[in-house]
Image (tube, helix red, strand yellow):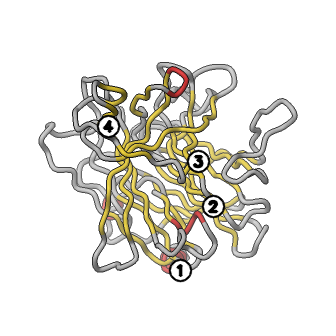
Amino acid sequence: MTSSGDADNDGVWGTNKVILSGWGQNGTTTTDHMGRIAFIDANDPNNLKYRWVLPVIPLNGGTDYRALKSHMGGMVWYQDKLIVTSWEKDSDNNVMYIFDMKRILQATVNSSAVGKVSGGWSADGYQYVMPAVGSYSLAGGACSSTNDDSRPCFGSISLDCGSVPDSLVATEWFSSGGTEPARIWRYDFSSEPGYLATDSSSHVNASAAYETNAVGLQGVLSHSVTSGGTPNFYVDDARGGVGQHGILWRQNTSGATAAANCGRDIMYACWGQHTESMSYWWSTGRVWTLTEWAADSTGHWTGTDHAIPQRVLFSVPLASMDSSLS
């Protein structure tokens, strides 16, 4: 979940308001865990229109490509770059890929394949592809969601334009049915548009790291009341169980406050079911997020292959979130 509200301070890309919604899918083919992005024309809130774009990874020196393996848990659109969390644990340990918003290509063949085919280029039936232009990988090996002492599997990322400099905030994923508390990291952006700051060895180092006491965090949003001030972290806790709503927390180094409940039982906590990434649209003061189709304790979708995903894209004013957390 990200938008032109992240990309530019005026909230528009050129003259357009745009929302990007990431979707992932599981399967048993070469496109397992394939991610796709809905580019939503949000100029008229009463008449939203969208087009699917398939993020792809270049192969063989750019002469071919494959689908990005990702459940699209986190996206940040910053300036002209899009950073997307990955599910590449079985190959090159990449945890985030970088895409260029000015490099979107049109497929020429309509088939179920992804990549170069006889007669041109295919994208599993989608019309557009976005090739990656870079990636970030973990130093020392693959991520692990076994415990909070391992290299993190990033579940969600978001943009903080209230920090100095602007920064990317990431949280790790653990099952809501487990016991491991999630950690949160902050990475500064560099002066090169859309890329994270590196040291003399070209390593990206976290400028801050925190450990929460919360289990099952799905999304994280960092926001400072004043530029460069002490940030509050808004995190959504995806509770297990069919039909259970999530819990919204506001946390800082002094403590944490949970959102008000809709009823006496905490299962009616007033937040969306399995919401994941959050995006703050600075020019409007609204926080955007989307619900996730119900998943089991391993993070896999539940239901049959033909079940209809019940997902809702919505926004609420940050001020109303704070009011419910007071």
Q: Quick one: label 3 or label 2, which is nearer the N terminus? A: 3
Label 1 – label 2 distance at C-alpha:
16 Å
Whether pointer 3 and pointer 1 mark residues with C-beta atoms closer than 8 Å, the reply is no
Residue 24 figure quarter: top left
- Which label belongs to residue 84? none
Q: Indicate left or right for 139 with 85 as reference.
A: right
Of the two numbered discs 3 and 2 in the rendering, the one whose residue sits closer to the viewer: 2
Q: Amino acid at mark 2?
A: Ser
Q: Which residue is mark 2?
A: 222
Label 4 – label 2 distance at C-alpha:
35 Å
- Which label belongs to residue 213? 3
Q: In the rendered view of the protein, which quadrant contains the N terminus? A: bottom left
Few, some or many residues within 10 Å of mark 2 (<14, 14–19, 20+) = many
Q: Amino acid at mark 3?
A: Asn
How many numbered dots are placed on residues in this image? 4
170 and 268: which is toward the camera: 170
Q: Amino acid at mark 1?
A: Thr
134 and 267: which is toward the camera: 134
Q: Residue 262: percent from the left, percent from the top?
A: 33, 72
Q: Quick one: label 1 or label 2, which is nearer the N terminus? A: 2
Q: Residue 108: percent from the left, percent from the top?
A: 30, 40
Regarding mark 4 in the picture, which secondary structure is present there?
strand
Q: Which residue is mark 4?
A: 123
Q: Residue 285: percent from the left, percent from the top?
A: 55, 78
The residue that appears at 75% across and 51% down in the rendered structure is: 192
Few, some or many residues within 10 Å of mark 4 (<14, 14–19, 20+) = many
Q: Quick one: label 3 or label 1, which is nearer the N terminus? A: 3
- Which label belongs to residue 284? 1
